[in-house]
Amino acid sequence: MLVSLQDMLQDAQKNNYAIASINTPNQILLRAVIAAAEDTNMPVTINHAQTEESVVPIEIAVPLMLDYAKKSKAAISVHVDHGFDFDHIMKAIRLGCTSIMYDCSRFPLEKNISEVKKFVEIAHPLGIGVEAELGAMPNNMPSEVHGQETSDLSDLTVYYTKPEEAERFCEETKCDVLTISFGTVHGMYASEPNLNIDLVREINALANGVSLGMHGGSGTPFDQIQSAITAGIKKINYFTAIDTAPAPYLAKTIAEAKNPVNFSLLANQAMEVIYNKTVEILNVFKNTGL
């Protein structure tokens, strides 16, 4: 069923779990993720990221996502991940997205606040949830796109969200989710993760009821994920580990094949791997112990 992010967050806060936020830029991912949500009875936000426009345009992706969400037995919201341009997120509203991340974290604090506040005033009367980001999320996903190059990962503390800025941001913007930086990395880690859970607790106490988000879930030890959930994280983006999981299996299938391999066989195998990986992480996000 299609539900609002706000309703999801309310239940996550009440029951101390985290909502998985997973990109679905193709139908294989879309079907596998929704099946995993149904079988684990966990809510999921399925995402279209603006950076995936070259893979599938939002005009194609979102109607398909909405159709699957409405027919699902699980609670599903349709979300825009890292919407950078105002025109893009307004297009997402017109297409029917139930929540949108307006990422202005590249701007100075004052502009980040003013841009997000302006968008919240548009989105909230329409029942649309808004996610924002404060602090810098380091990147370990090499890209030719300007601004998405690999970050210096030698000292992740320089990217941390400042608690006093988070308090002001939540108070002034009234966003629904504030994604913070506390030691995670977009993509995969270059060294052993060591999340600053105390920082999450501190920001959560100052967030004026705004739910906290975590990006860069892939590669994070499950015990640290659950500690972050208990400390206040209620929405977690988790994609790279899911999206890359099928490759070794598909490569083995192709290498061992004695005849040409049908794409449909590979697609079904990929779907099964993605489903199993998603089930695993959704069970972690329930936060009931390992």
Image: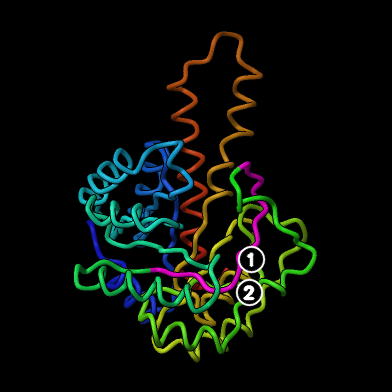
Residue displayed at 54% across by 85% down: 165
Range drawn in magenta: 131-144
What SS does tag 1 mark?
loop
Tags 1 and 2 in contact by the CB under 8 Å rule?
yes
73 left or right of 255 in image: left
In the displayed structure, would residue 173 be above or below residue 27?
below
Q: How many labels does the image show?
A: 2
* Mark 1 lies on residue: 184
Q: SS for tag 2? A: loop
Instruction: Estimate how packed mark 1 is, as few (under 14), some (14 to 19) or many (20 or more) residues with alpha carbons within 10 Å.
Output: many
Q: Which residue is drawn at 49% across and 31% down?
A: 269
- Disc 1 from disc 2: Cα separation: 6 Å
Foreground residue among 82 and 240 = 82
Question: Is residue 137 found inside the magenta-colored segment of the image?
Answer: yes
Please identify the residue farthest to the top as the structure is shown. 259
Looking at numbered disc 1 in the image, what kind of residue is underneath it?
Answer: Thr
